[in-house]
Image (cartoon, rainbow, N blue to C red):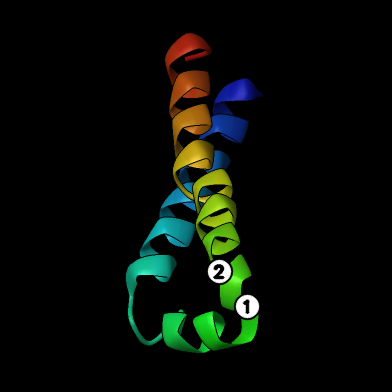
Amino acid sequence: MFSTIGMILVVAGLVVSVAFWIPGLCNRTRLKEMLGSRYPIVYVVYVANGPMLLVLGVILLIFFR
């Protein structure tokens, strides 16, 4: 069960990471305009939902495979 959850987290982390760095999907200039001085929050949300999900999924796959 944990290996399945780990695989889902890895896929979700990869999708979020790739989607964030493709210029057409995430319009960072528009986000900068909308958020102003709060723009660094976008990177906090990205790290929490991209690479951290990927790392957590890999850890689950390593320990529960």
Q: Residue at x 50, y 57 (%)?
A: 43
* Residue at x 48%, y 60% (from the top left corner): 16
Q: Residues within 10 Å of mark 1 (few under 14, many from 20)?
A: few
- Residue 27 spot, x, y in % from top left: 45, 85
Q: Which residue is mark 2?
A: 39
Assess whether mark 1 and mark 2 are in contact (beta carbons under 8 angstroms).
yes
**Mark 2 to mark 1 CA distance (whole Å):** 5 Å
**Which is more toward the observer, 23 or 28?**
28
With respect to residue 15, does 35 lie above or below? below
**Which residue is under mark 1?**
35
Residue 56 in the image, given as x and y percentages of width and height: 52, 29
22 in relation to 10, above or below = below
Amino acid type of the residue tagged 1 in the rendering: Leu
| 5 relative to 58 in the view: left or right | right
Counting from the top left corner in percent of width and height, residue 63 is at: 49, 10
In the image, 38 versus 3, the foreground residue is 38
Camera-nearest residue between 13 and 63: 13
Front position in the image: 33 or 63: 33
Callout 1: SS: helix
Image disc number at residue 55? none
Most extreme residue toward the left is 22
> Dot 2: few (<14), some (14–19), or many (≥20) neighbours within 10 Å?
some
Residue extending farthest front: 37
Quadrant of the frame with the N terminus? top right
Residue under the point 62% across and 85% down:
34
- The residue shown at (34%, 68%) is 21
* Badge 2 element: loop
Q: Position of residue 2 (x, y in %)?
A: 62, 22
Identify residue type, mark 2: Tyr
